[in-house]
Image (cartoon, helix red, strand yellow):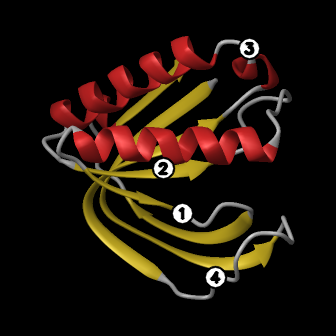
């Protein structure tokens, strides 16, 4: 798993192109403030190490959100950090599980529409822990 975490003062997305036809239709633009974004590339090998990968992902998300003083996290499937890609069903299931576990830990969690290209607007500050990359 590859994980790019960016703290954003402001973040918005607008669905543009549906890439997985079986996904629900989304057209609504959404906007957020003071949010920790997680751009996540779930890789094929993660399917064999699901428990360990989830544990590392949760630990990293909670840690970085704490460092950036926010309880808001948005999960974004970003299949551009590696050539290895997990099956879409596995990725979607993993995201839903992480979402639920973060909510149970007191976080407000959103997910960008799965299976879409999105127009993104990002306002990210320039300090060291505002952008962190991890290879889990």
Q: Is 30 left, or right, of 59 in this rendering?
A: right
Question: In the rendered image, is residue 100 in sight?
Answer: yes
Q: In the rendered structure, which disc, 1 or 3, sits on the residue that comes first in sequence?
A: 3
Residue picked out by circle 1: 112
Tell me residue 54's x, y (percent): 50, 23
Where does the image place residue 69, in percent across and percent down from the top left? 13, 41
Res 94 label:
none
Q: Position of residue 133 (x, y in %)?
A: 50, 26
Between the residue at mark 2 and the residue at mark 4, the CA separation in whole angstroms equals 16 Å
Determine the residue positioned at 75% across, 27% down. 43
Q: Is residue 135 visible?
A: no
Using the numbered discs, state the Cα–Cα distance from disc 1 to disc 2 in whole angstroms: 6 Å
Using the image, tell me which numbered label, if any, was put on residue 26: 4
Q: CA distance from mark 1 to mark 3?
A: 25 Å
Q: CA distance from mark 3 to mark 2?
A: 21 Å
Q: Residues within 10 Å of mark 2 (few under 14, many from 20)?
A: many
Residue marked by disc 2:
75
Say if mark 2 contacts mark 4, CB within 8 Å: no
Distance from Cα at disc 4 to Cα at disc 1: 10 Å
Mark 1 element type: loop
What is the number of the mark on residue 48? 3
Instruction: Give the residue at the far bottom of this rendering.
Output: 27
**Circle 4 — which element?**
loop
Which tag, 4 or 1, sits closer to the chain's start? 4
Q: Are marks 1 and 3 in contact (CB under 8 Å)?
A: no
- Depth check: give the residue in front, 108 or 76: 108
Q: Secondary structure at mark 2?
A: strand
Give the tally of numbered discs.
Answer: 4
Whether the residues at callouts 4 and 1 have beta carbons within 8 Å, the answer is: no
């Amino acid at each position: 798993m590859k994980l790019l975490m960016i703290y954003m003062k402001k973040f918005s997305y607008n669905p543009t192109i549906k890439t997985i036809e079986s996904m629900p239709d989304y057209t609504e633009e959404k906007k957020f403030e003071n949010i920790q974004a997680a751009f996540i590339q779930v890789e094929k090998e993660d399917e064999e190490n699901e428990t360990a990968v989830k544990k590392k992902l949760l630990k990293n998300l909670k840690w970085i959100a704490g460092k950036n003083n926010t309880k808001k996290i948005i999960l974004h499937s970003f299949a551009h950090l590696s050539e290895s890609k997990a099956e879409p069903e596995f990725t979607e299931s993993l995201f839903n599980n992480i979402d639920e576990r973060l909510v149970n830990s007191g976080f407000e969690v959103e997910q960008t529409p799965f299976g879409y290209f999105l127009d993104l607007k990002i306002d990210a500050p320039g300090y060291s822990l505002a952008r962190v990359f991890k290879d889990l």
